[in-house]
């Protein structure tokens, strides 16, 4: 994982009136809402005697540990130790590990890193997605490192093979470019120009139009957000939620705005999802076989020009990891 980043780790609707215990980033975490509805994320371990706080309950906006009833506020601090009495002392050391959260667009981000900076800049999302879209999401488990799952969604070379009978039908095996543009240090677009092999060599990235006149593009925001601009009114967003180093949850969200009627739009979202999952599972069965499981720049792979988005993703990812290491050391 890249430290010091905002990761989407949950969907808003997963956290309701009870504490929810999940594994994310290789850690056991508990998500819950305080009396104002704000999402709190704590390490799922009571600082008193180490049991899972997620087995407890919410009482007046506090999280009550199931073991000895200690209550924690939305800062993760114990505010009541029943054994010491209502007016009794609450030791300062009774502080659960807390992670900053941010909630927007129906997602919950968690700041993953060391000391968060005093002025934490909120995470970014895709500018083109606003309230005119409605959405439906599925959660799909992969037995793979999350960066491998991301790389698969940046891979424009695999499409006519892995998806030969779905989105890659037609045998467009020549990969012109692809063209890539960095929008900021942590965000880039990919424009694909795959075509039939007519005997001409692939065109170089610098000879291709940016943006692609078809309007199609893939967008990526570090560390774990991807968007496929399928059409003016349809988008597919992928969130690569790291469970641990070997497991990822792919949150696939289908957005549309061509239908407004509630029943119809639900119907179209649910009709689209099985196809999206079929395509994702064509990828999954291959991606789960990667060796080594964790990607990097120096793992003995032999990229070709069409793999450029993957190589650039890896470079930036390693630079961010290195930057976090330097910050830690200084
Ligand atoms: S272990 Fe949580 S209150 Fe004792
Ligand atoms: Fe794919």
Image (cartoon, helix red, strand yellow):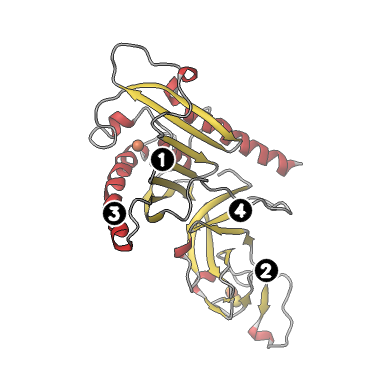
- Residues 7 and 171: in front is 171
Q: Residue at x 49, y 74 (%)?
A: 17
Residue 328 placed where, x, y %? 71, 44
| 184 to the left or right of 202 | right
| 118 to the left or right of 72 | right
- Which label number is shown at residue 229? 1
State the residue position of label 3. Answer: 268
Mark closer to the observer (3, 2): 3
Determine if the C-beta at disc 2 is less than 8 A from ligand 1. Answer: no
Q: CA distance from mark 3 to mark 4?
A: 34 Å
Give neighbour class at mark 3: few <14, some 14-19, many 20+ (Cα, 10 Å). some
| 165 to the left or right of 12 | left
State the residue position of label 2. Answer: 95
Mark closer to the observer (4, 1): 1
Helix, strand or loop status at disc 3: helix
Q: Which badge, 1 or 2, is on the more N-terminal residue?
A: 2
């Amino acid at each position: 994982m890249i430290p010091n980043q905002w990761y989407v780790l949950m969907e808003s609707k997963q956290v309701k009136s009870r504490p929810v215990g999940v594994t994310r980033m290789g850690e056991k975490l508990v998500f819950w809402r305080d009396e104002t509805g704000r999402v709190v994320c704590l390490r799922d371990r009571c600082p008193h005697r180490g049991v899972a706080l997620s087995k407890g309950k919410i009482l007046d906006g506090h999280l009550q540990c199931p073991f000895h009833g200690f209550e924690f506020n939305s800062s993760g601090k114990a505010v009541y130790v029943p054994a010491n009495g209502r007016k009794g002392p609450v030791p300062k050391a009774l502080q659960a590990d807390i992670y900053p959260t941010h909630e927007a667009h129906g997602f919950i981000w968690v700041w993953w890193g060391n000391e968060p900076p005093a002025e934490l800049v909120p995470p970014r999302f895709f500018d083109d997605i606003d309230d005119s879209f409605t959405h439906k999401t599925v959660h799909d488990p992969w037995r793979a490192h999350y960066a491998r799952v991301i790389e698969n969604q940046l891979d424009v070379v695999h499409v006519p093979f892995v998806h030969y009978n779905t989105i890659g039908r037609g045998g467009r095996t020549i990969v012109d470019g692809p063209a890539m543009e960095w929008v900021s240090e942590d965000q880039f677009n990919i424009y694909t120009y795959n075509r039939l092999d007519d005997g001409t060599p692939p065109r170089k990235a610098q000879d291709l139009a940016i943006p692609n006149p078809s309007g199609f593009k893939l967008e990526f925001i570090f560390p774990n957000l991807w968007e496929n601009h399928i059409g003016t009114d349809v988008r597919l967003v992928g969130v690569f939620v790291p469970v641990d180093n070997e497991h990822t949850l792919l949150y696939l969200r289908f957005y549309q705005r061509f239908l407004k009627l509630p029943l119809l739009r639900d119907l179209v979202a649910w009709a689209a999802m099985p196809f999206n999952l079929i395509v994702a599972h064509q990828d999954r069965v291959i991606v789960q076989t990667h060796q080594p499981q964790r990607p990097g720049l120096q793992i003995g792979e032999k990229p070709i020009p069409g793999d450029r988005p993957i190589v650039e993703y890896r470079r930036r990812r390693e630079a961010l990891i290195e930057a976090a290491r330097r910050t830690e050391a200084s």
